Image: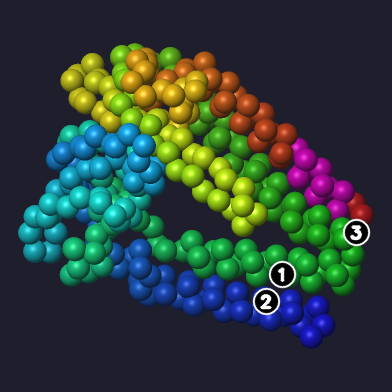
């Protein structure tokens, strides 16, 4: 089969998948739309086992009520149903979703109410179909179409979102100044070791810190960054800076957090300039 045939098949398959996905969304038949969503409340927080796996997160006991029957369920996140819980305290609300009539098939989610329309996979299929069309144009009409086709939409998207990102970064930097500081302690260090196909091993280390907010809320949280020598931090006393309105937003190093956000913004702007320039080169070379 010639390259054009492969590309036509590629676009046809992913285009059909996109149409099916969007059709299901319009009919209200996607998994996200059909799922029952309710709010659960953390009733008990377990202490992570030192040396355990980071994939386990924080062990919690959650109580939620089925809206249709009014029946109350008490469940745990043993076995990892749904999203991992990285920050927990007694009384914190978490999202719970499950198929209609099957509350025992629950899964935890960060979305407390609306879980979207299930358009993620159809949109991804559209992007793959679009990529096939750009490659088709580049083969037929030359490389400038690849630059314009790929970099042009990317640059427009970045330009559209840049003002909102700047405002968001400014709010986050301002929020750092308003954070409260309390003492904390590393109560466990979670560790996992993985091996790739070439036999190379990599180790992931996630310290778990416990602290009490100024209003007396006991918080247990995974802390993937902000500690020197995280592998040897078990039992270390630390200072935790957290947002009073939401203790889930915290850091152990405000200075590093500021530098990280500023670096991210610099990288975003530089990336926008590069892809924008590439799109202009493609358009001029047509």
Question: Viewer-nearest of labels 1 and 3?
Answer: 1
Between discs 1 and 3, the one toward the N terminus: 1
Q: Is residue 175 visible?
A: no
Residue 132, which numbered label?
1
Label 2 and label 1: CA atoms lie apart by: 7 Å
Q: In this view, does 8 lie to the left or right of 178?
A: right
User: Residue at left 76%, top 38%?
Assistant: 273
From which residue to which does the magenta span run? Answer: 273-282
**Residue 181 screen position, x and y as percent:** 34, 14
In the rendered view, would you say 168 is above or below 32? above
Between discs 3 and 2, the one toward the N terminus: 2
Q: Which of 123 and 57 is in front in this view?
A: 57
In the rendered view, would you say 174 is above or below 21? above
Residue 246, which numbered label?
none
Q: Is residue 119 visible?
A: yes
**Residue 265 screen position, x and y as percent:** 62, 30
* Disc 3 element: loop
**Residue 116 screen position, x and y as percent:** 38, 57
Colouring: rainbow
Pick out the residue farthest to the right.
Answer: 285
Instruction: Report which residue position mark 2 lands on.
Output: 10
Label 3 and label 2: CA atoms lie apart by: 25 Å
Instruction: Report which residue position mark 3 lands on.
Output: 286
The secondary structure that dominates the magenta segment is helix
Label 1 and label 3: CA atoms lie apart by: 19 Å
> Crowding near pointer 1: few (<14 within 10 Å), some, many (20+)?
many
* 198 part of magenta stretch: no
User: Residue at left 42%, top 75%?
Assistant: 24
Number of on-image labels:
3
- Label 2 with label 1: CB-CB less than 8 Å: yes
């Amino acid at each position: 089969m010639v390259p054009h045939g492969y590309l036509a098949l590629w676009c046809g398959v992913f285009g059909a998948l996109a149409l099916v996905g969007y059709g299901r969304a319009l009919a209200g038949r996607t998994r996200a739309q059909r799922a029952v969503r309710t709010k659960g409340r953390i009733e008990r927080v377990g202490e992570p086992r030192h040396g355990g796996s980071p994939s386990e997160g924080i062990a919690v006991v959650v109580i939620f009520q089925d809206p249709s029957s009014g029946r109350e369920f008490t469940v745990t996140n043993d076995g990892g149903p749904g999203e991992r819980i990285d920050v927990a305290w007694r009384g914190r609300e978490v999202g719970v979703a499950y198929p209609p009539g099957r509350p025992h098939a629950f899964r935890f989610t960060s979305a407390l109410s609306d879980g979207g329309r299930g358009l993620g996979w159809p949109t991804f299929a559209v992007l793959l179909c679009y990529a096939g069309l750009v490659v088709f144009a580049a083969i037929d009409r030359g490389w400038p179409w690849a630059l314009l086709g790929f970099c042009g939409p990317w640059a427009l998207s970045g330009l559209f979102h840049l003002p909102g990102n700047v405002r968001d970064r400014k709010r986050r930097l301002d929020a750092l100044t308003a954070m409260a500081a309390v003492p904390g302690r590393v109560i466990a260090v979670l560790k996992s070791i993985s091996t790739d196909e070439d036999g190379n091993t990599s180790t992931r280390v996630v310290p778990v810190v416990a602290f009490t907010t100024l209003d007396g809320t006991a918080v247990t949280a995974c802390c993937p960054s902000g500690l020197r020598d995280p592998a040897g931090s078990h039992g270390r006393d630390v200072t935790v800076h957290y947002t009073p309105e939401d203790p889930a937003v915290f850091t152990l190093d405000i200075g590093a957090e500021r530098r990280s956000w500023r670096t991210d913004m610099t990288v975003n702007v530089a990336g926008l300039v590069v892809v924008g320039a590439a799109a202009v080169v493609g358009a001029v070379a047509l």
